[in-house]
Amino acid sequence: MTQIRRLTDGTRRPGVLGVHSLDHFSMTVPNLEQAWHFYQSFGLDVREEGRGLALYAPGLEHRWGILNQGQSKKLHYLSFGAFEDDLPRFRDRLSVLHVERLAPPPGFESNGLWFHDHNGVLVEIRVAEKPSPNEKSSFTAYSAPAGVQQGTSYRRNAPPTRPRRLAHLALYTADVGRAIGFYRDVLGLRLSDSSEGNVAFMHGPHGSDHHMVAFARSAGPGLHHCSWDVGAVQEIGLGAMQMAGKGYAAGWGLGRHVLGSNYFHYVRDPWDSADVDYIPADHAWRSGDHPGEDSFFLWGPNPPEDFVRNYEIET
Ligand SMILES: [Fe+2]
């Protein structure tokens, strides 16, 4: 019954082959203890699993991230979720497009399809429940009604910021145009917006935020940031304070992006996000290409000078 409802309630675009979500990501980090402290401070539920760490949003049994020990911080793989009956079609598509199928990396066995993207990044398509929302996420603007004396709380009573879910990943790539083509043709993602060959934002066809992955031009692949969803601008501000109080003051924010419309605060490396544009499964989004200086951010401080330095290939 659930499956039938899913097919008819506007949360799946009929007849369209495409992944429905970004299921999780995996990366190596040079120090798991530091990673645990960072992501715990960020408000995530960090668990020891296997020989590494796993990232969960509080209250949701979905593993959004896997961290393992490595020589440096480096993106390991991306895993996208698909509907079960689409997996054979993805298998056929990989074959038709001559995308070589790979074995899962040792210790990451799964029933998914593994392959490299256009830039050598390891990607999986797996059967999974859709963990991303089927409608635009709720967003709260805290404001006191007229006559209420205290519209906010004492600072000592401020609630901790706890992300609700992974929102998207932004990836470095050597050729943004090829990235758009690969993720469109192989995974079925759609272009939301782009800017002059420097950045591109792509969404899933089955109801998706404005972007589940973004690409930024660099000399090679890498992970620029993972974005975590919260429900209010106030939570972004409190989250930034929370991180600064734990020793993670470096970053960029508060601000608002133009493409996607989301409010942001980047903390080196992850960042908070709220109120991103949403593209329903029955909506045909008109993608546009936008001038860089006019579409990076609507307001906020200037970004740090190394904001787009790819530390996975540069030092
Ligand atoms: Fe982003």
Image (cartoon, rainbow, N blue to C red):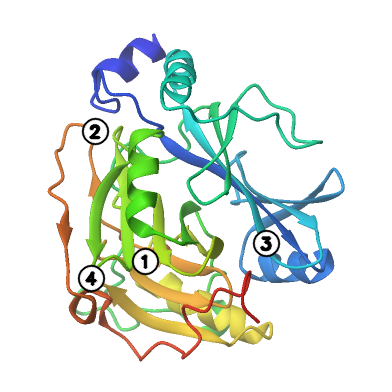
Q: Secondary structure at mark 1?
A: loop
The amino acid sitting under disc 2 is: Ala
For mark 3, what is the residue?
Answer: 74
Q: Position of residue 126 (x, y in %)?
A: 55, 28
Q: Are marks 1 and 3 in contact (CB under 8 Å)?
A: no
Closer mark to the observer between disc 3 and disc 2: 3
Q: Secondary structure at mark 3?
A: strand
Q: CA distance from mark 1 to mark 3?
A: 30 Å
- Badge 2: few (under 14), some or many (20 or more) residues near its Cα, within 10 Å? many
In the image: residue 198, left or right of residue 248: left
Q: CA distance from mark 3 to mark 2?
A: 33 Å
Closer mark to the observer between disc 1 and disc 2: 2
Q: CA distance from mark 3 to mark 4?
A: 28 Å
* Residue located at (47% from left, 27% from top): 98
Residue 61's disc number: none
First of labels 1, 2 by sequence position: 1
The amino acid sitting under disc 1 is: Ala
Q: Position of residue 178 (x, y in %)?
A: 37, 50
Residue 258's disc number: 4
Q: Secondary structure at mark 4?
A: loop
In the displayed structure, 7 sits above or below 117; it is above
Q: Residue furthest right?
A: 51
Q: Quadrant of residue 315?
A: bottom right
In the image: residue 78, left or right of residue 18: right
Q: Nearer the viewer, residue 144 or 241?
A: 241
Q: Position of residue 127 (x, y in %)?
A: 54, 23
